[in-house]
Image: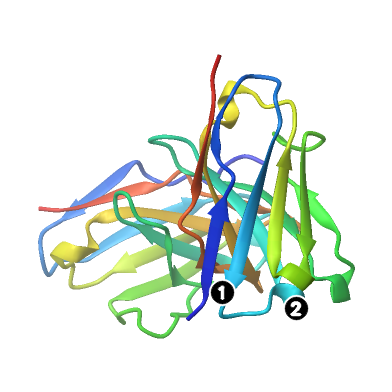
């Protein structure tokens, strides 16, 4: 059974940083393209960014609201995906999900981790 | 990239059909065949219901179907059941990025 387990969420102040992790089991992420998707409380889903597999170049692309402040990385040896979030703003408050993405579909989702940015 | 436009809510009685539209642009919905749909019950993780416009993952009932015309994709739920009451989101590839729809609440009357 495929499982994605996010961790690292919590309460931070505006301007602070946080790193989220997503540990995979039941699949090797080394050949997978992975994404982060977030959902603000009571709001809809928002694409955050995607990282390609290393064999496809390993590059990451980001949605406009987080470009320049968020960074996605991967450690295939640990089967883990990361999201480094810098200069956090109150509008970054959300549940953050990691997912696999295959040919345009988000097939496996984690249970999400809540990030709250508040003074 | 702006969110794809979905109706805020749709409703129907058990056994009826409902259709949710998802309107984008030629840079997303109209430009690619990578439109997917997700069902989310309150407090739960989104679940893939349709991918590549009209394909169903194994385990998804065949009363769920998808289509696309121009810049608008649609999800139809035929034979509506109580457990179909949930939020639904469309999503489209947009050239290295992805964009989700605004979400639609489906209510079973």
Residue drawn at (64%, 19%) of the image? A14
Question: Looking at this rendering, what residue extends furthest in the bottom direction?
Answer: B58
Q: Position of residue B19 (x, y in %)?
A: 32, 60
**Display colour scheme:** rainbow
Residue B60 seen by the camera? yes
Asked if residue A111 lies left or right of residue A99, the reply is left
Tell me the number on the disc at residue A41. none
Q: Position of residue B15 (x, y in %)?
A: 12, 70
Residue drawn at (21%, 66%) of the image? B17
Residue drawn at (45%, 72%) of the image? B50
Is B105 situated above or below A42? below
Q: Quadrant of residue B48?
A: bottom left
All told, the count of numbered labels is 2
The kind of secondary structure element at disc 2 is: helix
Q: Quadrant of the C terminus of chain A?
A: top right
Q: Position of residue B30 (x, y in %)?
A: 63, 60
Crowding around mark 1 (Cα neighbors within 10 Å: few <14, some 14 to 19, many 20+) is: some
Q: Nearer the viewer, residue A77 or B48?
A: A77
Q: Position of residue A77 (x, y in %)?
A: 78, 72
Q: Which residue is mark 2?
A: A31
Asked if residue B37 lies left or right of residue B79, the reply is right
Q: Nearer the viewer, residue A10 or A106?
A: A10
Asked if residue B101 lies left or right of residue A85, the reply is left
Is B1 situated above or below A116? below
Q: Nearer the viewer, residue B28 or A119?
A: A119
Q: CA distance from mark 2 to mark 1?
A: 21 Å
Residue A104 seen by the camera? no
Q: Which residue is mark 1?
A: B52
Residue drawn at (37%, 60%) of the image? B39
**Which chain is indicated by disc 2?**
A
Crowding around mark 2 (Cα neighbors within 10 Å: few <14, some 14 to 19, many 20+) is: few
């Amino acid at each position: 059974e495929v499982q994605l387990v996010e961790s690292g969420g919590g309460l931070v102040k505006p301007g602070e940083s946080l790193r989220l992790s997503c540990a995979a089991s039941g699949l090797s992420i080394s050949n997978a393209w992975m994404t982060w998707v977030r959902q603000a409380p009571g709001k809809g889903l928002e694409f955050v960014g995607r990282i390609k597999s290393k064999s496809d170049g390993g590059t990451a692309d980001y949605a406009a609201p987080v470009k320049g402040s968020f960074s996605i990385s991967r450690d295939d040896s640990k089967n883990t995906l990361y999201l480094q979030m810098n200069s956090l703003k109150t509008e970054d408050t959300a549940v953050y999900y990691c997912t696999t993405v295959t040919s345009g579909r988000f097939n496996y989702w984690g249970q999400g981790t809540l990030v709250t940015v508040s003074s | 990239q702006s969110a794809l436009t979905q109706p805020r809510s749709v409703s129907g009685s058990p056994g009826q059909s409902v259709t949710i539209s998802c309107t984008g642009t030629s840079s997303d919905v109209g430009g690619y065949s990578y439109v997917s749909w997700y069902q989310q019950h309150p407090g739960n993780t989104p679940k893939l219901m349709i991918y590549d416009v009209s394909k169903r993952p194994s385990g998804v009932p065949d009363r769920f179907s998808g289509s696309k015309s121009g810049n608008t994709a649609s999800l139809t739920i035929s034979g509506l059941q109580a457990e179909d009451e949930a939020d639904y989101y469309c999503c489209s590839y947009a050239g290295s990025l992805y964009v989700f729809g605004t979400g639609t609440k489906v209510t079973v009357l």
